[in-house]
Image: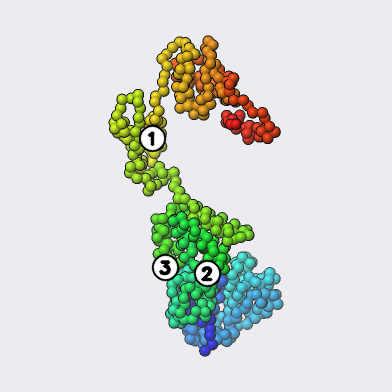
Amino acid sequence: MAFIVTARKWRPQLFEEVVGQQHITTTLKNAIENDRIGHAYIFAGPRGVGKTTTARILAKRLNCLNPNGGEPCNECEACRNFLKSQTLDIIEIDGASNRGIEEIKTLIESVKYSPTSGKYKIYIVDEVHMLSTTSFNALLKTLEEPPEHTIFIFATTDIHKVPLTIISRCQRFDFRRIEHDEIKTLLAKIAKEEKIKIDDESLTIIAKKADGALRDAESIFDQVVSFCGNNVDVKILRQMLNLIDDEIYFDISDAILSKKFQVAFEISNKIYRNGWNFIDFSNGLLEHFRNILTVIISGDTELIETSEINKKKYLTYKDKFSKGDLLRILNFVSKLQNELKMAQDQKLKVEISLSHLIGLEKTATITELLEGNFTAGITEDKKKSKIVETNSRNNYSVNNKQATEEKKFKIDFNPPKKKAAENIKHVEQQTTATKDEPPLKKVKHVTTLTLETVKENWKFYKEFVNKEKFTLGALITNTTPVKIDGNTITVEVEDKEDIEILNNSKEQLNKFFYSTYNAKYDLQFIASKTGKKKAEPTEDSEKYNNHPLVKAIKEQLGGREFK
């Protein structure tokens, strides 16, 4: 007996055998049983999902002599003639090769003739969107009011090319892609009947390769059986279809967790040696991390289209990645897809990108930190700050001081959300109050000061300024009071470029002076006679100093140039 391809040999002959289109087959069966048969139907959907098959079953049932409810009997003379392509009442037309006005005129002329033996004369027009505009226009009147014995069934993979005037005269049915598991189930049934041994992983590969088209899946199945024989091996199957091994993707996700940068170069070299497409690799990598994200969000593998073995592997990543990290990885891989299309050396691009991917560090949100959910690396002894302060001026023992500080720094690492900000502020205040430095000396209240008194306590003044505003503290460090004249104290500054900044902050510095000396004086800053000499400007330095950015830093931010 001559070989018949699987798509033809296993083509459904009943509505109940049509896979994945129950919403359409049920509607058609009910319409037939209730005698609500339309005069024109249009079946739209992707390739290989059962449009033409459903049209043939419908035509066969409408002319069946001994129907079984909404199903044809496939045994009467009308059904047998149809199966042998010997009936004159069911006419199949290819829209691509009969798209001209002359062919449509011939069809319109034949419509008026009654069927020879059946109840209806049925026209099945496949790929109807290929008809020309004039052909559609010529068909309009006949399609709107055909003879009672005439029924039109149109099938198309591109419904948008069919004029709305045609669609509005038909009952429209939209076919959907066949689900992944339904394709696997049907292929497993066919393999069992044909006595072909094939595992779940091989069926998964074929189903994914078909991308929702059952006819494509059956064609790939025939090709695989021809290559492998009656015992299909998944390794040979991958080699035949030139598919990338799934283990590569799992190796990458494991390398990210273990920070093994060598894996990036090993995988890139393996892809290159096997002749795999780097863009296909990036597509598979994106799907791989999408699957991991699905597992983490849903907690199961119901939304993953892969083999049972791989589903178990994906479950192992349930607690190893965070949602935020996976979103960063998916964004990174998406950019890699676009960049690979423009890259001259795709192998080098993949090596660098995978190295970056493996080097990504784990992240945590501010909310997680405040709520205490990111405490995996914090041990109990780190939760209690053990600060020992030695101060020769105070008569506290080390042990008593340590106990006091531990009590002061005992922080709740899982505070209520409403009190998180107050706790943080409280910690900052306590930390500021316990710096390892002696309390600043304060001069007794006096009405007038002598130059010797000012010089003697100047270091405490500088410490006070540095504590209150460290930016001014850095400038006041190299200063010396040299003269008191009435209510004015003259202070020499080593670097004369600091004078302008100090004068601009004189009001604040005077307040700091009062806080230290308990006396109100006005500080006057002058350049030191023994200070730094300004270097002679060069052409490059003038060009640098006149730059708008440099000027803005000096004028608005108080910056200065260090020689």
Tell me where residue 112 appears, x and y as whole percent: 63, 80
Say which residue appears at 41% left-offset and 44% top-offset.
Answer: 369
* Residue on which disc 1 sits: 427
- The circle on residue 197 is none
Residue 482 vs residue 484, the one in the foreground: 482
Residue 546 vertical placement versus 507 (above, below): below
Task: Find the residue positioned furthest to the front.
Answer: 530
Residue kind at label 3, given as amino acid type = Glu
Look at the numbered disc 1 and give the secondary structure of its residue.
helix
Q: Give the quadrant of residue 427.
A: top left
Residue at (46%, 62%) from the top-left corner? 250
- The foreground one among 501 and 265 is 265
Question: Residue beneath label 3, please?
Answer: 308
Structural crowding at the residue carrying mark 2, measured as other residues with C-alpha within 10 Å and reported as few (<14), some (14–19) or many (≥20): some
Please provide percent x and percent y for residue 200. 43, 72
Residue placed under numbered mark 2 in the picture: 243
Q: Residues within 10 Å of mark 3 (few under 14, many from 20)?
A: some
Res. 167 image quadrant: bottom right
**From where the camera sits, is residue 528 visible?**
yes
Question: Given the image, on which type of amino acid does mark 2 rest?
Answer: Leu
The first of marks 3 and 1 along the sequence is: 3
In space, the residues marked 3 and 1 are separated at their CA atoms by 52 Å
Which residue corresponds to the image point at 58% horizontal and 61% vertical from the top-left? 347
What type is the residue that disc 1 sits on? Val
Where residue 450 appears, as percent x and y from the top left, is 48, 12
